[in-house]
Image: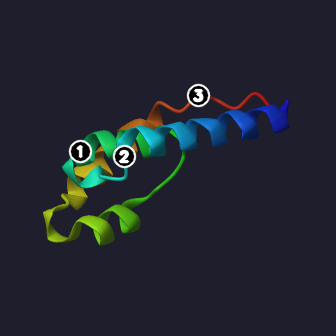
Amino acid sequence: MRPLLVVVTLCTLLAGCASTGGNDCSSDPFQLGQRDGVLGANELDRHAARCGTSFNVERYREGNREGFSRRPIPLW
């Protein structure tokens, strides 16, 4: 069961990266934070480095906390 979860997670991450076209700077930081939070990731440093001062760090953190709180409970 666990290998299947890893494969599904990797596919989801790859699909998420492909759908953004590599330009997360034009996206809402709250939505990016939510997406990363649901996936259990914190990509704040990466987004902030790519986007510079235009990236709203606090908005990302709010979204990440909200997304992380919606994570499903692992069944392993």
Q: Residues within 10 Å of mark 3 (few under 14, many from 20)?
A: few
> Which label sits in the foreground, 1 or 3?
1
Q: Name the colouring of the figure.
A: rainbow
Mark 3 residue type? Pro
N-term-proximal mark, 3 vs 2: 2
> Which label sits in the foreground, 3 or 2?
2
Q: Name the side, left or right, on which 52 lies relative to 31.
A: left
Callout 1: SS: loop
N-term-proximal mark, 1 vs 2: 2
Quadrant location of residue 14? top right
Image location (x, y in percent) of residue 18:
46, 42
Q: Give residue 21's mark.
A: 2
Image location (x, y in percent) of residue 27:
23, 44
Q: Is residue 55 above or below residue 62?
A: below
Quadrant location of residue 49? bottom left
Q: Name the side, left or right, on which 65 lies relative to 48.
A: right
Viewer-nearest residue: 31 or 17 = 17
Q: How many marks?
A: 3
Mark 2 residue type? Gly
According to the image, label 3 marks what residue?
72
Q: Name the side, left or right, on which 30 lies relative to 21.
A: left
Q: Is residue 52 above or below residue 26?
A: below
Callout 3: SS: loop
Q: Is residue 35 above or below residue 44?
A: above
Q: Is residue 7 visible?
A: yes
